[in-house]
Image: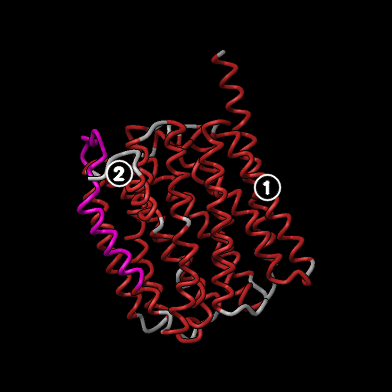
Amino acid sequence: MLKPNTLALTTLLAMLVATGPLSTDIYLPSLPGLATDLSTDEAGAQLTLSVFLAGVALGQIFYGPVSDRFGRRPALLFALVVYMAGSVMCSFANDIDGLIISRFVQAIGAAGPMVLGRSIVRDLYEGTRAGQELSRMGAIMGIVPAIAPVLGAVLEILFDWRAAFITTLIFGFCTALWVYYQLPETIKNKRPEPLTVISIFASFGPMLKNRAFLINLAILCTTYAGLFAFISSSSFILQGVYGLNEIAFGLCYGLIVLAYILGASIGNRLGPKRGLDRTMNLGTRLQLAGGISMIGAALIPAVGPYGIVFSQMIYMVGLGITMPLSMAAALIPFPDRAGAASSLLGVAHLSFAALTGAIVGEMLNQTAWPLAIALLILGVLALLMSQISLIEVRNRNRRVS
C-alpha cells in the first residue's frame, strides 16, 4: 500500500485529479472535425465541453459527503467505473445529442477522482503542507494536459475523434487498478449521521458561513474560469482564426501547460516561505498581466497566434501558483469535513467556469476578443479577491497580537 510523503502516492493523487483535464484536453484538436462529422456548429461542439464541466460540478455535490460517510476508496472505485462507462458511450455516439449525453455520464464519473484526490490530501496533510502537496500534484498532473492535446492530434490524424475517448477508457481502467491494489483508506473518522439529500446539502453549511473559505473560493472561481475560457475557445481561435494545424495546436497547448507546471512549482517553493495568501497574490497579479497582454495581442493582429499563446502562458503561470494554494487555504479550516468542503469547492468553481465557457463560446466571432476580454475581467476579479484576503489575514494577525 502507498504511504504518505512518497512520490508514488503524490503521483497517483495527481492522476486522479488529472482525470478531468485529460477528458477535455485530449479531444480539443478534434473539435473542428467532430463538429463536421456530427453535423453541428462551433457552439454545439463547444457545448460538449460545458456539459462535461457542468456534470463534474453536479457529481461533486455528492462524492465528498458520501466519502465522508462510507470512505474514500469505495466512492472512488464507483466513480471510476461510471467514468469508464461514459467513455465507452462517447466512443459510440452517432450524433451531437448522443455525445452530449455521453459526456455528461463521463463527467459524473470524472467528478469522483477530482474531488476525492483533494479530500485525501486534506486527510493526510495539515496547513501549508497541504498546499505544498497540491502544488506538487499540480506540477505532476500538468504532464497529462501537456501531452494530451499532442496525443489527441495524432489520434485525430491517424483515426478520428472517437480514438480520444477510447484512450480515456484505458486511462480510467489503469487508474482503477492502481487505486484497488495500492491506495489505502485515508479517512480517519467517518461521519456517523445517516446520509440523505438534506444531510448532504446541510454538510455545506459550515463552509458557507466561513469568511476565509468564501474568499478563497472566489479566488479559485475567477482563476479557473480563465483557464476554461481558453480551453473552450482555443481550438476555434488558434485553428479556425489563425490557421494552425492539429499538431501545431497541440504543441502550443503543451507550452501553455508547461507554463502551468512552472507556476505550480513556484507555488510549491514560495508557499511555505511567504505564506499562502502572499503567494496567491503574486499569482493573481500574473493572471491580470496575462489578461492585459491578451488584449494587446487582440489589438495587434500582426503578432499572430504566438501573441495569444504567450499571453495565455503568463496567465497560466499565475494560475499554477494560485489554484492549488486557494484550494488548500479553503480546506484548512475543515479537517473533519474535508470531503464536503472539497465537494463545495468543486461544484462552485466548475459551475462558474462552465458558465464562463458557455458565454465565451457564444461570443466567438472569428477573433480573439471574447477570450481576451474574459481574461482581463477575471484577472481583475481574482486580484481584487486576493487583496481582500491579504487584508483579512493582516487584521486577524493584529487581533491575535
Q: Image point 71% across, 60% down: which residue?
A: 294
Q: Amino acid at mark 2?
A: Pro
Within-10-Å neighbours for mark 1: few <14, some 14–19, many 20+: some
- Which residue occupies the foreground of this view, 313 or 226? 313
Task: Give the SS element for disc 2.
Answer: helix
- Which residue occupies the foreground of this view, 13 or 91? 13
Q: Is residue 140 magenta?
A: no
Q: Amino acid at mark 1?
A: Val
Residue 393 percent across, percent down from the top left = 58, 26
The quadrant in which residue 107 appears is: bottom left
Q: Which residues are magenta?
A: 167-196
The quadrant in which residue 161 appears is: bottom left
In the picture, the quarter occupied by the C terminus is top right
Mark sitting earlier along the chain (2/1):
2
In the picture, the quarter occupied by the N terminus is top left
Query: Circle 2 is placed at which residue position?
Result: 65
Residue 20 percent across, percent down from the top left = 41, 60
In the picture, the disc for residue 302 is: none
Residue sticking out furthest to the front: 7
Q: Image point 60% across, 34% down: which residue?
A: 278
Query: Circle 1 is placed at which residue position?
Result: 380
Residue 219 percent across, percent down from the top left = 56, 43
Q: Is residue 158 left or right of residue 368?
A: left
Task: Relative to 288, say whether 52 is above or below.
Answer: below
Q: Is residue 377 left or right of residue 220?
A: right
CA–CA distance between discs 2 and 1? 33 Å
Q: Image point 35% across, 48% down: which residue?
A: 117
Within-10-Å neighbours for mark 2: few <14, some 14–19, many 20+: many
